[in-house]
Amino acid sequence: MLIILWLPFHVLGDSLAAQRERYQAIKQAWDANDNHRVASLMPTLTEYPLYPYLAYRRLTQDLNTISGAQVETFIKQYPHFPLNQKLSTLFVNQLAQRKEWHSLLAFSPSPPRPIIARCNYYTSFAPIKKRSIFKFNSA
């Protein structure tokens, strides 16, 4: 009996109710800034239907440090997730805030639909063009 208690939750094939409880526990841990608890519970819910919302929350909380590859991986992994467009928009705006113009254009090669993200997209051309003009004139 003790062996069963030490098995990871996902190995036990636990009930939806147990997963739901852990989902709520993660949300409470996040609200309490208990990142250690969040990190320990997240892997136990990868098969839970609402797991993409947890992964989304993690990404959006780390927007200032994540890469375009991480956002693209999430979108490919959960192609029908309803907040994918919002995630892309948030990331484009974060790249603009960081002034990572090349990264913004690499992540969003065409103009995004939301107005602020679209403005940031077009703004990203100015520093790049300005630098290329200076390089051209100094040659």
Image (cartoon, helix red, strand yellow):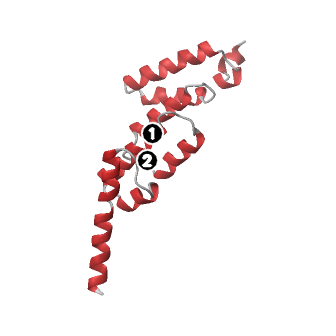
Label 1 packing within 10 angstroms: few (<14), some (14-19), many (20+): some
Q: How many marks?
A: 2
Q: Position of residue 129 (x, y in %)?
A: 31, 70
Q: Say what amino acid the circle numbered 2 marks.
A: Ile
Residue 131, by quadrant, is bottom left
Q: Residues within 10 Å of mark 2 (few under 14, many from 20)?
A: some
Residue at 27% over, 71% down: 130
Q: Measuring from the top left, give residue 76's x and y in whole percent.
A: 58, 44
Helix, strand or loop status at disc 2: loop
Q: Are marks 1 and 2 in contact (CB under 8 Å)?
A: yes
Residue found 63% across the figure and 16% down from its top: 16
**Residue 96 drawn above or below residue 60:** below
- Residue 20 lies, with reference to residue 103, above or below; the image says above
Q: Position of residue 96 (x, y in %)?
A: 32, 53
Task: Say which of 47 and 85 sits in front.
Answer: 85
Going by the numbered disc 1, the residue's amino acid type is Leu
What number is the disc on residue 15?
none
Q: Identify the residue position indicated by label 2 in the image.
A: 66
Q: Residue at x 35, y 55 (%)?
A: 121
Mark toward the start of the polypeptide (1 vs 2)? 1
* x, y percent for residue 65: 40, 47
The residue that label 1 is drawn on is 59
**Secondary structure at numbered mark 1:** helix
In the rendered image, the vertical position of residue 59 relative to residue 6, given as above or below: below
Is 39 left or right of 95, judged from the image as shown? right
Specify the quadrant that holds the N terminus: top right
Rendered residue at 31%/53% (across/down)? 120
Residue 126 falls in image quadrant: bottom left
Which of 110 and 51 lies nearest the eye of the viewer? 110
Looking at the image, which residue sits at the far bottom? 139
* Spatial separation of the CA atoms under disc 1 and disc 2: 7 Å
Q: Quadrant of the C terminus?
A: bottom left
